Structure formats: structure tokens, C-alpha cells
Image (spheres, helix red, strand yellow):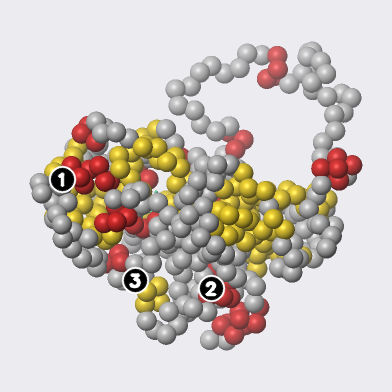
Amino acid sequence: MKKKGLTRRAMLSGTAISVIPAASLANSIKEGSPSWMITPGKTFSEYGVPSSQEENIKREIFQPYEEYAPGSGVAMTPLEKLEGIITPNGLHFERSHNGVPNINADQHELLIHGLVDKPLVFKMEDLLKYPMVTKTYFIECGGNSFYNSNAFPIAIDRTCGSIHGLISTSEWTGVSLKTVLNEAGIKKEALWLLAEGADAAAMSRSIPLEKALDDTLIALYQNGERIRPEQGYPMRLVVPGWEGNISIKWLRRIKVTKKPTYTKDETSKYSDLLVSGKTLQFTFPMEVKSVITQPTAGPKPLKKGPVHITGLAWSGLGNIKKVEISTDKGKTWNVAKIEGSNEPLSPVRFRYNWIWQGEECSIESRATDSKNNTQPQRTVWSVKFGLGHLYHNNSIQIWRITPNGKVFNEYDDLAQNEKWSEK
Ligand SMILES: Nc1nc2c(c(=O)[nH]1)N[C@H]1C(S)=C(S)[C@@H](COP(=O)(O)O)O[C@H]1N2
Ligand SMILES: [Mo]
């Protein structure tokens, strides 16, 4: 089989990506050179912001109940405009059920109670005295990719970020939840805990004690600075690899319990309706997934010639074993290069060089994790769930490319789309 990837030789002998013209800016500095080369630059700033030319790199806001509950909704990370694996703090996705509370960090308290030897209250200054850990983890909302879920039986034309932008990654620093629980002393019969936020949604979830004692963090810092108000200032849980909802922001209370509490947020929501009419509950891990972030749907048409395909892959069950790319509607798959340290519960960036000859085609990525789970096709994923179901969609994203270079969101089974559209 002929390899479709672009070799270094082909890259060098093919279309040159950039050439240096004789009258380049670099050749000489003289009168008439751009002002930034011949006049002193702006002085210092206390807190930097991106270049004004990058102003259009923003989160996309979606407030479905804008009139009566404007604080319920999402702001999605513009994945197609970012590189690497870390999300800049100002672009970390936001999912809030009742707005961002304006918490006074000095007054904020974290209560640990329930099945403990001695209930404790921690102020911020108390937590800062404990040993800290730093870990790079993604947070993905259980409802990520809802535009490609069973709630949308026909593929709609949206950008990568506005379909998949409910995943972001930070380097989180904080105190292990285990440290704090051990300080209070866990009673023998304890098996679960309840975590609750200080926001007006009082978001609360039950967490198995095993996960709480394993890798769950009380995060205080995000990418080196105190976590942003949108991310849970002054403290939040990061329950790595599990559906984002359980990573309670603005954490105010942990109650150690024997059984799950069955809160509103884990009964009426964040449960998975099957076709049988039964519902799955406590489906915590976000399963293996990947998405091509470039090239992707957007205003700029794709140009013929060398194309650098790149994207993100992650798994809530381990790390990434491989990412494969297909450029021929899934007939053949080629292994992409994976970058970075590939830590568990942290994404990798994948890269694959390709030459687009201008044919009608589609590009898609398929990730496999260290537990040998592979991303399903959308049809395989969707048939398990009822119409309207949207959580835990880890199916393969297909980008269709038309001969004029327009890139579209596409589903793998058009017949299935039609079947649903009749309903
Ligand atoms: N207290 C509280 N915690 C919360 C939420 C909330 O509305 N209130 N939203 C949850 C949901 S659904 C998700 S996906 C993540 C999102 O975290 P982020 O906004 O920092 O991206 O926080 C979770 N924790
Ligand atoms: Mo979420």
C-alpha cells in the first residue's frame, strides 16, 4: 500500500511554504522601515494580554436560557485557534449552572464533615500550609460534543471549538483531597462523599471514596496563577479523567457518607438514557477521544498542496497509545506522530503531514488508549442511547472537504440521519 503521508523530501521538493524575497524587511534597516523597527517600543505592563491583533481568539458563549437564567450555559474553548495541549487561562472553557459567584477568598471556608473522626473547617490560608502537588489534567464536560450527539441527528456546520470546545487542559496545583480527608480521619464505614459548591446552583455530586483518595485534587492554582473565578476561585475539585461536572468549583463542603447522596445533578442530569428506556447512572470516566483541530470547518478554504493535520487526543482511563488518521473516508488509517510526555489523564497533540490534491474527501482521527479502548464511529456510539441523549459522546469526528476547499462537519451514516429526520 502506498503511504499517503508527506515525507520530508516531498515537503522540501514540493511547494515551498515560504521564500525570502530580495527586498525582505530583514535586509536593511533604513528610513521607511516599519515604525516598530526604528522607534522605541511600548514600555512595561503589570499584567500582559495577547496582541490586539489576536482579539478574535475568544470563547464562544452559549446561554440557552438567557432571559431567565443567564448564568446557565457554556463558554467554549476555540480549539481550532490554539496549539500545544495547555489552554490559556482566559480561554479555559466555562460551564456554570448559575453564574460565577464573586467569592471573598478570605471569608471562604471548606467544611469537611459526615463520617469523620473530627469535622474540620479549612480557610484558604490553612490549605496553603499543606504539601502541594502539580499535575496536568484535562477537564471535559460530560456534555461535550453535544452538537454531534443524538440531540442533533443531522450534522450541523459548526467550527471545531463550537462542537468540541468543552475540553480544556491546565497544569493544576493544589492539595490532594486525601491529605485533607486524612486530617479529619475517615470512619471505617465510609464509602462515598458528597462535594458541594458555594455558587447559587449549589452544584453537588457524590464521589466514590476510592477516587477521592486516589488522584483527586483541591486545586488552588491553574497554570501557575491562582485559579480564575470562572474555574472555581478560590478552590475547586479536579477529579481527573471523570466527567467535568464532578469537579466541583467554588468548593465549600465535603460530607463523607456511606452511600451516594443522589443529588439533583446526578439524577435529573448527568445520567445516560439508553434506547431500552433504562438510564445509566454514575458513568464517571470520559472515554478515549480525539479531534482534528486543524484543518477544520471555518471561513478559510483549504488550499491544495501540503496540509499539516493536527489535533488533540485524550482518555479519562489512561494515556494515549496511538492516534490514526484517515483521509479516505475511513478505508485506510495511518499512524500520526504523538508529541509530549503523554501522561495519564492529560491530552497529547498529534501531527500528520498530508498532501491534498484537491479531491472531494474527508479527514478523521481515531485514538486508542493505554487500556486498548478505541474511539467508536458515531453510528456505533449513538445506537446505544435514546433520541436526545448527549452525554459522553466520544465518537469520531469527520471533517468533509469539498473540491473547493470548504471543510464541513459530517456524520458517518447518512442513512441514519435520514431515518431520524423523519421522526
Ligand atoms: N459549583 C459548581 N461546580 C461546577 C459547575 C457548576 O455550575 N457549579 N459546573 C460543572 C460542570 S458541568 C463542568 S463541565 C465543570 C466545568 O469546569 P470549568 O468551568 O472550569 O471549565 O465544572 C463543574 N463544576
Ligand atoms: Mo459539564
Per the image, the residue denoted by label 2 is: 381
Q: Verify CB contact (< 8 Å) between mark 1 and mark 3.
A: no
Q: Nearer the viewer, mark 1 or mark 3?
A: 1
Q: Earlier in the sequence, mark 2 or mark 3?
A: 3
Amino acid type indicated by mark 3: Gln
Per the image, the residue denoted by label 1 is: 184
Count of all numbered marks drawn on residues in the image:
3
Amino acid type indicated by mark 1: Ala
Q: Secondary structure at mark 2?
A: helix
Residue drawn at x 69%, y 59% is: 325
- Percent x, y for residue 36? 68, 20
Image quarter for residue 359?
A: bottom right
Amino acid type indicated by mark 2: Trp
Q: CA distance from mark 1 to mark 3?
A: 29 Å
Q: Tag 1: Cα neighbours inside 10 Å, few (<14), some, or many (≥20)?
A: some
Image quarter for residue 114?
A: bottom left
Image quarter for residue 50?
A: top right
Per the image, the residue denoted by label 3 is: 281
- Percent x, y for residue 396? 60, 65
Residue drawn at x 78%, y 14% is: 29
Q: Earlier in the sequence, mark 1 or mark 3?
A: 1
226 on left or right of 152: left
- Percent x, y for residue 189? 16, 60
Q: Tag 2: Cα neighbours inside 10 Å, few (<14), some, or many (≥20)?
A: some
Q: Nearer the viewer, mark 1 or mark 2?
A: 1
